Image (tube, coloured by chain):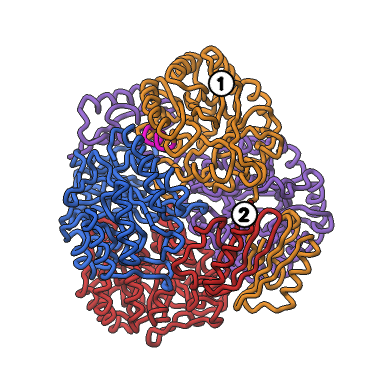
Chain colours: A orange, B purple, C blue, D red
Amino acid sequence: MIIVMRPGVTRQEIENVEKRLIELGFKTHPIYGEVKTVIGAVGDKRLLEGHNLLQLPGVESIVPIMKPYKLVGRELKKDNTIVKADDVEIGGNKLVVMAGPCAVESREQLFEVAKKVKEAGATVLRGGAYKPRTSPYSFQGMEEEGLKILSEAARYYGLKVVTEVMDTRDVELVARYADILQIGARNMQNYRLLKECGLSRKPVLLKRGLCATIEEWLMAAEYVAVSGNSDIILCERGIRTFETTTRNTMDINAVPVVKELSHLPIVVDPSHGCGNWKWVDAVSRAFVAAGADGLMVEVHPDPANAVSDGNQSLKPEKFAHLMESLKPIAQAVGREL
Amino acid sequence: MIIVMRPGVTRQEIENVEKRLIELGFKTHPIYGEVKTVIGAVGDKRLLEGHNLLQLPGVESIVPIMKPYKLVGRELKKDNTIVKADDVEIGGNKLVVMAGPCAVESREQLFEVAKKVKEAGATVLRGGAYKPRTSPYSFQGMEEEGLKILSEAARYYGLKVVTEVMDTRDVELVARYADILQIGARNMQNYRLLKECGLSRKPVLLKRGLCATIEEWLMAAEYVAVSGNSDIILCERGIRTFETTTRNTMDINAVPVVKELSHLPIVVDPSHGCGNWKWVDAVSRAFVAAGADGLMVEVHPDPANAVSDGNQSLKPEKFAHLMESLKPIAQAVGREL
Amino acid sequence: MIIVMRPGVTRQEIENVEKRLIELGFKTHPIYGEVKTVIGAVGDKRLLEGHNLLQLPGVESIVPIMKPYKLVGRELKKDNTIVKADDVEIGGNKLVVMAGPCAVESREQLFEVAKKVKEAGATVLRGGAYKPRTSPYSFQGMEEEGLKILSEAARYYGLKVVTEVMDTRDVELVARYADILQIGARNMQNYRLLKECGLSRKPVLLKRGLCATIEEWLMAAEYVAVSGNSDIILCERGIRTFETTTRNTMDINAVPVVKELSHLPIVVDPSHGCGNWKWVDAVSRAFVAAGADGLMVEVHPDPANAVSDGNQSLKPEKFAHLMESLKPIAQAVGREL
Amino acid sequence: MIIVMRPGVTRQEIENVEKRLIELGFKTHPIYGEVKTVIGAVGDKRLLEGHNLLQLPGVESIVPIMKPYKLVGRELKKDNTIVKADDVEIGGNKLVVMAGPCAVESREQLFEVAKKVKEAGATVLRGGAYKPRTSPYSFQGMEEEGLKILSEAARYYGLKVVTEVMDTRDVELVARYADILQIGARNMQNYRLLKECGLSRKPVLLKRGLCATIEEWLMAAEYVAVSGNSDIILCERGIRTFETTTRNTMDINAVPVVKELSHLPIVVDPSHGCGNWKWVDAVSRAFVAAGADGLMVEVHPDPANAVSDGNQSLKPEKFAHLMESLKPIAQAVGREL
């Protein structure tokens, strides 16, 4: 940690800051420049808890040196984490594809989609039973009935289930039906939910918040990890920017950056990131080429009558076509699909 | 609602869209331009639930005409809402000032702050017993013990209590101690929490999400209202932008815009919006001049040793000074403090 | 164009708006909803020039239906534009790769880089002789001397030249040495420069502004086209967002979106978009997979001693390696490198 | 400057970095932490020009300590700068109000507006003779003819003139008619224009770029100052964010922040910042309360027929009313209007 002092600070002010740092357990190393003085402070930043050096006279700013995340960062664990949902591995050589409708609507719908995505090569079935909708007047999900349908369709076709949990009170129930618990973008900083999922034994797919920096996203993962669950899959799903032609802006840079900063696997949700099925193909190929560990794609048998997000859902045949087109790209970057 | 058809669409495609709209219960009004055709559709947009016109051949885009929020909008209720927390009115002629520490830390701290903010003219005491912290390694709040202290200090000095609730499971407990339930920025789209607070009888202070548009913020308020609770106070607390000198960017435009679009009161939290106590004064004065209905300010007796957000907290004497400086501004815009 | 009237508007106000529209040359089609009335107005939006319907009593908002760009849009020209810089085609089946240093520093540097990028498969040499630098204290470019070196090195190795022009007064001079005129991100809305480049016979590479929407970017291209020059290459180079780990956020969605909205070719500059050479490879592969028509990459023989942007420049051998890795990706999407 | 080394760096790598720093003229101060080592480097950052320490093995990041701007910053000049356009002072105790139409349209229009804004208390007349328009099909300004009209109307009513210059070739001509040269938001990083205006003897009003950080804005001012002209007025006019209800988001925090970082005066343009005349009043009052040194407001005698920005222009009587309402606010913060 570096404490930057203001220009024109007095020697007394510098010594007071040093004294305080030493009291808190740091070792100090002042460096006197021509205009400004800085103080290097060696020690665990957590020693600062409950103390605001910025309020001491003469302090201009504090520059952290260590990353704030420990368990999910590469600084202390070099090897890639491979998350397992039974026999499905996420983060290994084989890319994982999670596909299915935005929302569970009916038994027929789910079984039809499950069959089709399985045939096309997906190994995980997605589908929402609890839906976070911007409008209270929109469909809010089939709840436990939806979870049951999802689970049955998945079992029938030999798929795993990923589904969103929105409320701390539902974690146990959802975990009964799901193989992977999904935390949605809007709940990325719902810390109580992160902790509750951290207490579960099920892998957690953590979507990036709409305006979360990569560091905040990793800190959210740290919440899950610190609660005891390190089976975490990061999911880039687009961030909010000034661009309005697309629903969100997919942050393609996030793939190599996350791979550098963290050992966790990263998958991508191009459906939400684009907001329009027409662009999903190109963007899916891009993320595989960039090194993502998998995809989560919305597929619906009849998008024109989907209860939610129909406009960003692929028809099953388009999805099958996308899967074919991804194979040579995966191969080009040394992966399998 | 206006359906815009692509250039080069066929008459058959136009008729299909019209047919579908009529089946769904809309009245249709096609307008043929030189390059594009649009179809006006009169009827309640909720008729569309479960149908995606964008997936019909020839449809380019859909333009909504009505605002998506009903209960919290001005379109159907013209008069300003005045929210009452017992004898404290929010949204009336008198500005409300909510002040106190970021987090409840101890009995001594709270009683000291409560006394000082009361003397300076605040009528509501703020303080967090459950703290949403970016890092799992930071202080997470005193929980029920904190609520008790908060409540006692407030009663002792004749103040009301506003405090954050983060988890659906805590709403009942928090409501037992608080006069106003606060929903934090990170939970603005935690819809289950919005609904649970909507079932409470206590007024709800709803902070704007870090990257929420004004429309999304009003839709979040609509969730609370639709659950039966229309005592909602909006709180602007800064949005996330590319600017990094300040913690957030305070959206001053939001005050006149919200006043136009909604009948709900709006207060402002300059402490989080600036992230530095030095700028809180100027920004507080600005929001009062713009027409805000009140302030929520962080005040701490010893900011250098606050367990959280010390750098954005005012000392009690600076707070008293700010209150004095606000009076002529309030008067200039026809309000009292 | 759709004029949306406020709720509670009078019949007289509606008729006044219609009357005004008819005077301006539009045909009007009012549609009466339960709460709001809208008026469809058929005619060229340019008839509105000098008139603000929003100021008429009762008007709430105006919704445009036609895209504001004509010459660069797909609505009126369906076929892809292939731009030619002599024998180098941009937008055809073969991807174009433009490579070279951020700034021209010396004859030796340029000849060394030119040789290496030619060997690796680039066909266009990049290098700045006029540098837009955030600090006035940074190197501002070798100017005409730099243009000469650039041109000689390119001719010697059989490459074309792309280089930035920053000032209307320099367009003629730069066009004497360059095969493609580059307009930088900071000048994307420097309309006088756009027009001046539009009067040149040389192809124009138009970088996307740091906070330009896709629509504004196409409108900037329209400025060039309307001045008589339709040889325009769009260049995505990252937009500014709240994310600070990377220099900018590369907008991968822009590739399929631009391909849908415009017939112009689009290339990508991952060096500026990432700001760090370590991430350039992954992002380059991503853009080729998404369907970009080419790349512009910073390559420097000694990045540790580059006068600008050294941190985002690839060494020649890394660049050669990147080129190899792009081939199977190009092939996978039906392109050649 | 602090050089942060990666975890696991070797002693040899640390020594190499130190050696290089010493060669460049810095004094070095290594600090060894448990996981990371940092090296404090004392010396002028400009010594680094042409060298990229980030490319040296083991270097993770570089943290600057000094502000990059010198002439416009408070670090070296404590007193507020008061800019003079003849007898009009900007930055003194009296607030300056600049008002007039977006574009000069005719002699009649200008004389009418000039008369009205003078009566209401403005001292500077604004009006564009060269207009930067998003669409090439929109009115581009009356050019020199407009400058003449502007100048005559201003002289007639005893006002000063502020008007935009868009092209380096026009600086001399515009300076002949204007008392203050305006550099628009889109040209804030048009460095050649900044330099050319820096060579002029006229004060420069520098608008903040649409996505410029405060630091970049001050660096743009530094370009003007370093060319010899320190009569610079900063103008906040809203930044681009995700919010779409308003044209831009006014950054109210920028007022106290700029006052802290720089000695230059700061005025505000609420017309562009809001994009709608209805919100201009509230926002103007807010900026005066926050401590801005003045306002630049669009006023048009017939906004419904303005050739540009009519929707954000005030009618003269509304402007006069705004001026009245500002007086008690100015007084409340110790200023005059």
Which residue position holds label 1? A160
Quick one: label 2, few (<14), some, or many (20+) residues within 10 Å? some
Name which quarter of the figure residue A131 lies in. top right
Task: Establish if C280 lies above or below D108.
Answer: above
| Image point (39%, 62%), residue name | D272
Residue C49, labelled with which disc? none
| Main secondary structure along the magenta-highlighted residues | helix
Magenta stretch encompasses residue A284: yes
Residue D9, labelled with which disc? 2
Q: Amino acid at mark 1?
A: Lys
Task: Establish if A275 lies above or below D189.
Answer: above
**Image x and y of residue C223, in percent:** 23, 56
Task: Establish if A270 lies above or below C143.
Answer: above
| Image point (33%, 84%), residue name | D158
Name which quarter of the figure residue D309 lies in. bottom left
| Image point (68%, 26%), residue name | A172
Point out the residue furthest to the front here: D12
Task: Establish if C57 lies above or below C31.
Answer: below
Quarter that holds the N terminus of chain D: bottom right
Q: Chain of mark 1?
A: A
Asked if badges 2 and 1 are on one and the same chain, I answer no
* Mark whose residue sits in front, 2 or 1: 2
**Image x and y of residue C86, in percent:** 16, 51
Q: Is residue C82 left or right of residue D32?
A: left
Can residue C199 be seen in the rendering of this structure? yes
**Image x and y of residue C48, in percent:** 23, 54
Quick one: label 1, few (<14), some, or many (20+) residues within 10 Å? many
Secondary structure at badge 2 equals loop
Secondary structure at badge 1 equals strand
- Magenta-highlighted residues: A281-287
Q: Amino acid at mark 2?
A: Val
Point out the residue furthest to the bottom here: D87
